[in-house]
Image (tube, rainbow, N blue to C red):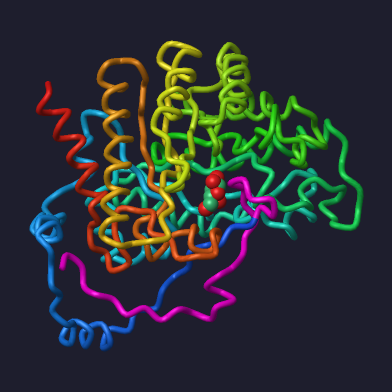
Amino acid sequence: MTFKKKIVTCMASAMAMAVLLAGCGNSNNEQTATSEPQVTEAAEDKAEETAAPTTETAAEDEIQNKDASTMSLKEAYKDLFDIGVAVNSWQLADKKVLARITKDYSTFTCENEMKPDYLLDHNASMEAKDGMPVLTTEKLDEILTMAEDAGLKMRGHTLVWHSQTPEWLFREGYDDGKDYVDKDTMLKRMESYIKKVITYCQEKHPGVVYAWDVVNECASDNKGLRTDSLWYKVIGEEYIEKAFEYARKYADKDVKLFINDYGMTSPERRKTYTALVKKIWDQGNIDGIGMQSHHDRENFDVAQIETSIYAFSAIADGIEIQLTELDMHYNDNSEAAMKEQAENYKKLFDLLVNVDTKGHANITNVTFWGLDDEHTWLTGFKKETSYPLLYDKDGNAKPSYFAIIEAAEAAKAAQ
Ligand code: GLA
């Protein structure tokens, strides 16, 4: 076993399952955060001593014989694109977990801790003499320092989003009981917020945040733009272009700016984003498109992914494509199901490698939305245990892990 078997006792369930506002196409916009586990060392050791031997089939044997501790995703893909992972600060602070992160990944995204809900200080904003929003930066500084120390780059996620953004930000005096402000005031607040977050990161920890999801999930589930966003309601559809204009104004030259959304394989969204991104590209304010890539066993369709990658790449020469929140929901972790998942991941990575090496698309990062099946938002979101990632709940590499390594090796062999 690569990693010690862990007996995990969850914190109080209310804390452990803090429900946060999020997107991803559910009508309630609810997200379950993955929270810090408590590991009981004595129980951990006991479990190792008493673990019953298992009978393994030949296929399992083959997988068990591969030693993931001698492999590295980021090394396998180093000539192609960055491989990243979504994490929480408690994972970075845990030396063993951090070692797992740095073994396979060269970038990370904060699952939650860089969202407006986490960065905005309500009281300080209410008291601000200039009426502009004020940040709380202690946790942010801690995260940026850990990234810097570990030599990891970060995708900044996310500046402007309808979800996980406090409603008071849109109201007069930042007072929940008052009316929404007018468009000009909101544009000033937006510029101030974007400026403060971006400049804080680059001044305190230059070079760590190398890309920003400037606007997240601005498309409707049906057609055109999402209209139930307070950004849209208070500012109008111009808020998207303005957010990019401000981000470009304050971001260092080499920092990349992205628009990010789920459902990027739907024909409607493909159309919406192709037109929108073309406009912002022509204004010189965007570098790429983030395809979140939350897949389901049932709807995984590599042909649709390919069509979207080609459509987005045709917007402009060199436009970057990143898969920013990759996972694949399976509610079954039987050997057959995990083998099927591995085949799907292999198909996806074969495609990414192929379009990237042939110059059909400029893929620059693929980020998994979590480190292992023990810590995935999908189990809360789907209300059933999910097994979507590359490591199982005990930290053992799954068939999907080896399949993705194989896709990189096959590409090298073909050169
Ligand atoms: C969306 C957001 C992410 C995260 C996921 C669920 O995709 O972009 O920040 O909230 O939902 O974890």
Q: Is residue 369 above or below residue 306?
A: below
Reply yes or no: does residue 264 show up in magenta: no
- Evaluate whether residue 188 shows in this view: yes
On-image quarter of the N terminus: bottom left
**Which is nearer the eye, 26 or 57?**
57
Q: Quadrant of residue 403?
A: top left
Q: Total of numbered circles in the picture?
A: 0
Where does the image place residue 234, in percent across and percent down from the top left? 82, 37
Lateral position of residue 51 relative to residue 393, left or right: left
Where does the image place residue 112, in percent across and percent down from the top left? 53, 54
Lateral position of residue 67 relative to residue 296, left or right: left
Q: Quadrant of residue 47?
A: bottom left
Q: Is residue 31 above or below residue 35?
A: above
Lateral position of residue 368 relative to residue 13, left or right: left
Q: Residue visible at 18% across and 87% down?
A: 50
Magenta residues span: 1-29
Secondary structure mainly formed by the magenta segment = loop
- Evaluate whether residue 114 shows in this view: no
Where does the image place residue 351, in percent across and percent down from the top left? 31, 28
**Which is nearer the eye, 48 or 350?**
350
Q: Residue visible at 53% across and 22% down?
A: 286
Q: Residue visible at 59% across and 68% down?
A: 18
Q: Residue visible at 9% across and 28% down?
A: 413
Where does the image place residue 333, in percent across and percent down from the top left? 33, 62
On-image quarter of the C terminus: top left
Q: Is residue 178 above or below residue 239?
A: below
Reply yes or no: does residue 22 show up in magenta: yes
